[in-house]
Amino acid sequence: MVGDFSVGKTSLTQKFVNNVFSDKYLTTIGVKIDTAIVADTKLIVWDVAGRDSLSPINASYLVGAAGVVLVCDGSRASTVSDLLDIWNTVTERIGVVPAVVALNKADLPEWNISDEMYAAFDKQSWDVFPTSAKEGDNVKEMFEKLVNKLSSQVV
Amino acid sequence: MNNTVDVIVQQKINEQLFQKLELAYFCVDHSMRVKDASDNLIDYGYEPIRPGSDIEDHIDFMIGLDSHTELDLPIVASPSGIPISVSLLPSENQLTVLIVNASTQADQRQLLQQKANENELLVFQQKKLMVQLEQASLELEKKNMQLEEASRLQTSFLSGVSHEFRTPLTSIIGYTNLVKQDLQKVSQELVPRIVGNDDSPNYLRAVQRSSKHLLSLVENLLDHGKLDSNEIVIRPKATNILEVFEDVELLLKPLSNTKQVELRANIDLPPKALAVLDDSRLRQCLINLVGNAVKFTDIGSVTLDASLTGEVLHVTVEDTGPGISQQDLEKIRLPFWQGSDTGKAGTGLGLTITERLVELMGGELLIKSELGKGTVVEFELPAPLVYLDEPANSLEGIPVKPLRILLAEDDTDIADLVCMMLIERGIEVDRVENGALAVEALKKGRYDLVLMDIHMPIMTGYDALAELNARGDTTPVVVMSASAVDADKAKAIELGCRGYLVKPVDVDDIIGMAGQVLS
Ligand SMILES: Nc1nc2c(ncn2[C@@H]2O[C@H](COP(=O)(O)OP(=O)(O)OP(=O)(O)O)[C@@H](O)[C@H]2O)c(=O)[nH]1
Ligand SMILES: [Mg+2]
């Protein structure tokens, strides 16, 4: 799970793994590792500390990842465009891997993704999901899509 | 480690270091089979690991990692919740993984990062609010401009309409006067119903009263427009204030006579006192206030008090009418407000205008009222006293030979009227219907005075004035216009007119002005 700070990486993971959501913001330090079973696949989710003003994403935490979930906050435009930057960090360290995009906080009225951003995502051939960790919308679908991509890649 | 250090010391150091760092470890071969593992792994929430088992079955973070690559994971949340630091150290035939307690670093980091991120979110929210605020204020500005535009349009419409009304009203009022005078001459006995004697109602007086009332309504509309656009200017001049009040009393007496209302006037003013104030605006205020009081009082009395203390004029208008509720007192100053009694016709502008005029003249209008007990309106105005000779206001002292006036007026009704009125006073009048003809007439003949309308076909009064200036003609010109707009008056004066009369004019206005100009 990669993206800027406070975009909902932890919230999406917790919603998916434990079906819980909290409004309180507790920033993730380093990495927290969770496990989920999707169909017959064991998915190990590395919920990495977001990129913030103190530090970039520590690429060591990306080592060994089979795929990534790029998470942004649809109500903060800068987090959306930052995804392209973050994707560079990923590919520099582990190469091109299957990826899905969570345009999170879709439940907020301020949620708004510009056409330019959609076009940019299209170019990367990412699967894009407007998600809400709060309401649960598209959370399962997004993770299942990633697992799908991973297994079709292996075969 | 240094060879000179005893093995026993080395062991002790290791022990202490292990304890201090709470160091745990495990070793795997390159197919990820466990070779060795420390017992204290359970302190971090990991299950005991048997040698020979697959490490990926025991330790989640090892899944997907490579046994040949050196790697540092500075802070990882262990199953126990204790943050750990993990180091993968590969060698030729195994991979050693060291785990140490990283609580201290994690706690510090947590504090810092939480604060920094929350701050940044706050800044973001602030920026967003600022943008919203800016947008809101932009929208407000736009709305305001639209409102201003609407009000400007309304004002210019009102001014336009009321201006249009003046001309026909001038005719109506003037002719009614003439008819009345003529009839009075013919025979009072013959047509008493029309002319009336002083105490019986009559048709002509009703027509006169109504048209004057209509004129004052129109004037109020026009003034409202001008007040809105700050066009009204107060022109103080030496004024016999007693006369102003007596005029108002005379004017409004008939109004109260038609109802069961007694109009009392306690006018305590020195008969010859001249005060510097705008008499026509003061008159307008008094007519509005007393007129209102009479209008709204059905039974009882309306009292007009006026007195002078030093150089301050006090005016009080008190009525025994229905009074105004506290709630309505706030609304009463709004333009066009009519109150709940829609039976009393008017534009609802009188009080708004009066209040503004009193302010412009340096006073303040106070309204005290109680439902069922009547209303008191009062104001004070600065009234600096002067001592002047009587202003030349008549033709006395002007050479006795008959006065010759040239009248330039395109509206035939008004031209007829003015001619008749002037001829009746023994004045010779020639009339033309536009500026060009006026200029022609002045080339041929000599006149004591020109009475000039402004809006005329072929050549306007303005152009005629300019033409006369260019020709060096010095015949005094008095402009007679339906426009009470100050800008129009200023333009005429700039073009050298000697006097400016606003229609409707009566013969006394013309003669008074002629007296002033010619003396
Ligand atoms: N309304 C709404 N709020 C959300 C959603 N997802 C997360 N949040 C809130 O956003 C804040 C940040 O969520 P986290 O899941 O902690 O974000 P993160 O990406 O893990 O942040 P870091 O760990 O600091 O990088 C929290 O207050 C959440 O409650 C969502 O879908 N809708
Ligand atoms: Mg997090």
Image (cartoon, grey):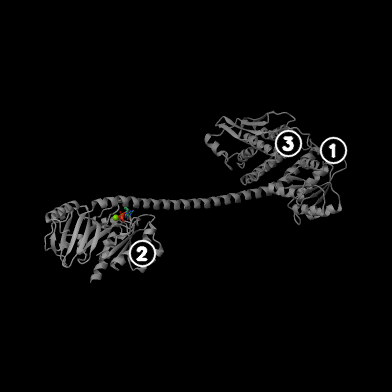
Give the structural element (helix, strand or loop) at label 3. strand
Q: Amino acid at mark 1?
A: Gly
Disc ID at residue B214 = none
Query: Label 1, label 3: how many angstroms apart (C-alpha)?
Result: 21 Å
Tell me if residue B204 comes above or below residue B435 in the rendering. above
Which residue is disc 1 drawn over?
B397
Q: Crowding near pointer 1: few (<14 within 10 Å), some, many (20+)? A: few
Disc ID at residue A84 = 2
Quarter of the C terminus of chain B within the rendering: top right
Q: Are marks 2 and 3 in contact (CB under 8 Å)?
A: no
Disc ID at residue B238 = 3
Q: Are marks 1 and 3 in contact (CB under 8 Å)?
A: no
Q: Crowding near pointer 2: few (<14 within 10 Å), some, many (20+)? A: some
User: Mark 1 or 3 closer to N-term?
Assistant: 3
Q: Determine whether, in the image, residue B442 is placed left or right of residue B309.
A: right
The answer to whether residue A124 of the structure is visible from this angle is yes
Residue at mark 1: chain: B
Quadrant of the rendered structure where residue B460 is?
bottom right
Q: Determine whether, in the image, residue B319 is placed left or right of residue B133.
A: right
Confirm if mark 1 falls within 8 A of ligand 1: no
Confirm if mark 3 falls within 8 A of ligand 1: no
Residue at horizontal 76 percent and vertical 55 percent from the top? B459
